[in-house]
Image (cartoon, rainbow, N blue to C red):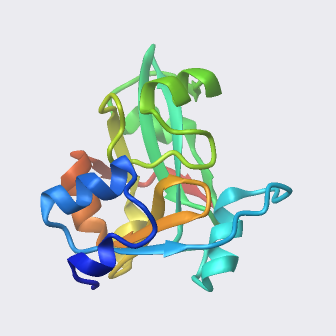
Amino acid sequence: MAKKAKKQQGGGTPATVALTGAGTDFTVHAYEHDPASASYGEEAADALGVSPERVFKTLVADVDGELTVAVVPVAGQLDLKALATAVGGKRATMADPAAAERTTGYVRGGISPLGQRKRLRTVLDASASAHPTICVSAGRRGLEVELAPSDLAALTDAVLAPIGRV
């Protein structure tokens, strides 16, 4: 992985600041975001030349009245029932986008599981552990961080569970 000097490239978002502060190895990948793109995650995978199974999107859901972060591969979808089960809840729905932005401090399409304004309960899809590194949003559109799934899980206190579906 890249060393500290490389880590600073691409700007200091709350996510990269959190990673640097924790001493975690990571690499920043920047690309030109196309506002007309239909899918932020697929755009990132294409732009970076990375398999969509290794690029993960950060979604915010409401599980029994509590906002919860779900991190799933861009190649699939979030299984809301599995997410609720993973955190001991009964029902999950996608969160209101404005509430997700306000709570995390990030804009839609740039929400990172790291460095959020208010730390939310996090579930990482179990498929992440099949890869040595994965990419997640670095906190803005057009910016991704690549890191070990175990580091992401540790930094977010994430539960690993099968919450994604193809």
Q: Quadrant of the N terminus?
A: bottom left
- On the rendered structure, is 24 left or right of 31? left
- In the rendered image, the residue lying farthest to the right is 36
Q: Position of residue 133 (x, y in %)?
A: 36, 78
Q: How many numbered discs, if any?
A: 0
Residue plotted at (67% across, 78% down): 47
**Which image quadrant for residue 69?**
top left
- Residue 72 in the image, given as x and y percentages of width and height: 51, 56
Name the residue rendered at 58%, 26% in the picture: 95
For residue 72, side relative to residue 40 (left or right): left
The quarter of the picture where residue 118 lies is: top left
Q: Residue at x 69, y 70 (%)?
A: 32
In the displayed structure, would residue 8 be above or below residue 87?
below
Q: Nearer the viewer, residue 72 or 28?
A: 28
Residue placed at 35% from the left, 47% from the top? 14
Q: Position of residue 124 (x, y in %)?
A: 38, 53
